[in-house]
Image (cartoon, coloured by chain):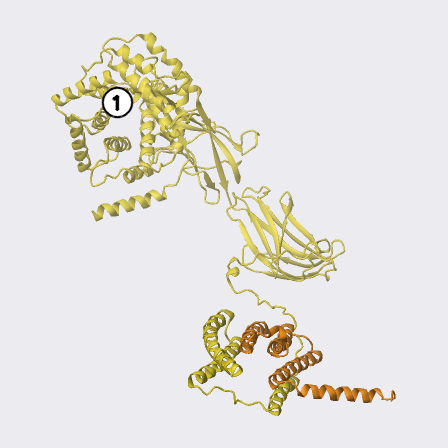
Chain colours: A yellow, B orange
Amino acid sequence: MARSLIGFMVLLLFLSTCEASPIYQPISVCHRSAALVHFSPDHGSFKSLEETYEALRTFDVLGIQKKPNVTATACRLISEAVGSSSSTPKDLFYALKANSVAKCKINDKVFQGIITRLNAAVNDASSLLDFHYSVGGLVLVKSSKPDVHLANADGIFRSVKAFSQGDGKWRYSSNNPESSAFAAGIALETLAGIVSLASSELDQSLVSTLNNDISKLFDSIEKYDNEVLYFDVMLGDGHDHQGPLATTSSIVRGLTAFAALPGNKILGLANFFLGVGVPGDAKDLFNQIDSLACLESNRQGFPLALLMVSIPLILFLPSTVLSLTKKDSLQVKVNTVLGLNPPPLTVKLVGAFTSGSKDASLVESQELGFDAGTGLHNLNNLPKSIDVGSYTFVFEIVLHKPEDEKVYVTGGQKKVPVFVTGLIKIENAEIAILGSDLGSIETQKKLDLAGQSAVSLSANHLRKLRVSFKLTTPHGLAFNPHQVLLKLRHESKVEHLFVVGNSGEQFEIILNFLGLVEKFFYLSGRYDIELTVGDVVMDNSLLRAIGHIELDLPEPPEKAPRPPPQPVDPYSRYGPKAEITHIFKAPEKRPQKELSFAFLGLTFLPLLGFLFGLYRLGVNLKNFPTNTVAATFAVLFHVGIGAVLLLYVFFWLKLDLFQTLKLLGLLGVFLVFVGHRILSYLAATSAKLKSA
Amino acid sequence: MGRTSSKEDAGALFHSLRSAYAATPVNLKIIDLYVGFAIFTALIQVVYMAIVGSFPFNSFLSGVLSCFGTAVLAVCLRIQVNKENKEFKDLPPERAFADFVLCNLVLHLVIMNFLG
């Protein structure tokens, strides 16, 4: 279990290194590893008969050795399905399809049972898929039992033909208006099966009515890049949701069954399937591999019309980037779509053109030498006329045997974009400070762009800076790279970029600081100088800091533009911000403490005066009640008033209004009660005195 | 006879007022004393405000109005307690005093809230 897991991981790792190929390359090792990854059985068996069939067919086409337990479990699944009387026609169909690859033994009695059930299914069929499974099953049985026939082939043919909409799309059933091109492929496969099962010759007129449907189907074929043909999901395809890969794949199967694929379309369709690269899921991989196998072994058709069998040959370059420095040679490979060896042939280089130009070819037409060991066609020495740059090479395949031409499709001339790279020589690199007079040179230094040295210069705004160098290709021609830039960066990180112009080989830029003062925002100081020379075909593109210059610029005037704000480190927004200085209202002028205390003392004077006045009036407490109860109430009354006043003091000091009101409520009730008692007592006493 | 100076007239008026005032009952005199005390306290606060300015104004108002308020309530009490006042003949003075106490307590609650 662990070993298989490790093996699986190794496969996955390997698969991740298989990149999508830019040009259409045939099936390779990457597809094999993908198949092993996608079709790995769960505990030795697959989830369904359909998946079993897809796995077996993919392994078979790719030449992967099946593990014995996989075949054993597949056979078990198949025999279960064919033996059980409750299997649907769909199960039988896929079981028989899987069996055509696995070749398990099924005994005659079981076969008889299958034939009866499928015949019954054909008669009961009402939808396109019903017909497809039952007729397809019978076709597969016929390969083991050649005497299987279909009664009433005419009638069944007509029933299936009735599903056609006439515009290339077919419906799935008569009461469902949804139609698709995918269904067209299924229908064609089914009809081919009916033709092969017919006990007597079918009415040819019936079959020829199909030509109209097939031509309508081809009308809807999509083109891409002049090389790729495919069938896309057409507008109005109901809930089918089959992508272009599944749709094209189904149509290829159908047309192959009828041998109705025209030779001129085969290469385009093959390019489509190869262009998918390595698909990401099992179904896509099966569709791709199965379709390519159909295209390759196109012989299995019926001689309805001419025997149109064409096997496409794919020409590709393992590497489209050739380096003059490493003395790479041009290598071309030709394979069939499934990566098998082609018939004996020669590859001719018909011409080479600079990309985008319509000038004559730079090379003469010549043949490439063939190395039988590696299977590569080589051109060992690139012609002298090929310098660095991007080219379009045109190749042609010439088959050795004339009879192969009827079998194989070469696709005529093939254009391949090729990049030729090399070392660009940079010579006479110099940097100089020029004076204001014409031609006067103040400082001149040689630049060593290959090394690490840095120059140090200084200038003021009246001077000019000149940088110059020469670029030549390995063959000595002038070279104009994509990027030649000079950058000056100030210490405050403000940058200025200039493009270096050229005339032929000589590149030169002169920065006149007098005119650039405003562009530099009047910033004086140290500027770092950086030179960039780059192109896709340069082996030695460079981006180098060549030194620095101390610039002395005049002071900025009033309205000078400020330098743009430099980008702030994005994480600094999470750091502490600047301190905020609040502006408060200036506090009111308060009086001096002594004055306030003096007046506080003064405020108590009237109180003293009041108390003195009371004394002078002869106030006394003679009328205080002597009765204990009354006296208690009297005391409580005064205590109560005192408590309320104390509460007010606390209110001012620390309590809030709600707390005060709560307590006041309690005290108030107490006070009212007590006060009422004592005052009513006093009133009663004085009334008694008055009446007495 | 008609040559009595205004000064002498003022002096005679003052004396007659004084003697008449001496006849008022003691409890009314206590209340008058209390009113005088309250007014004087208010005047001192006004003088203080005049010296140092009216910040904080709510405190000044609170202090002054407490004095004036309690003075007014005392005047009401005096009216109700005065036996010569026929209007309040049937009102027992204890009741008037209870009203006076209650109203003062409410006044001082409001004052303390406004004092700040």
Q: Which quadrant holds residue B49?
A: bottom right
| Amino acid type, callout 1 | Tyr
Q: Considering depth in this image, is A614 or A553 the residue closer to the camera? A: A614
Q: Position of residue A89 (x, y in %)?
A: 22, 24
Q: Position of residue A574 (x, y in %)?
A: 50, 61
User: Considering only vertical position in the picture, is B71 above or below A505?
Assistant: below
Question: The disc numbered 1 marks a residue on which chain?
Answer: A
Q: Position of residue A511 (x, y in %)?
A: 68, 53
Q: Considering depth in this image, is A652 or A391 the residue closer to the camera? A: A652
Secondary structure at numbered mark 1: helix
Q: How many marks?
A: 1
- Outermost front residue: A692
Residue drawn at x 25%, y 45% as measured from the top left? A7
Instruction: Say whether residue A473 is left or right of residue A312.
Output: right
Q: Considering depth in this image, is A110 or A88 the residue closer to the camera? A: A88
Residue A108 in view, yes or no: yes
User: Considering only vertical position in the picture, is A34 above or below A336?
Assistant: below
Q: Position of residue A569 (x, y in %)?
A: 53, 59
Badge 1: few (under 14), some or many (20 or more) residues near its Cα, within 10 Å? many
Residue drawn at x 23%, y 31% as measured from the top left? A49
Residue drawn at x 40%, y 15% as measured from the top left? A166
User: Considering only vertical position in the picture, is A385 above or below B38?
Assistant: above
Residue A333 in view, yes or no: no
Mark 1 = which residue?
A133
Instruction: Say whether residue A306 is left or right of residue A197.
Output: right
Instruction: Say whether residue A85 is left or right of residue A184.
Output: left
Q: Which quadrant holds residue B16?
A: bottom right
Q: Considering depth in this image, is A186 or B82 the residue closer to the camera? A: B82
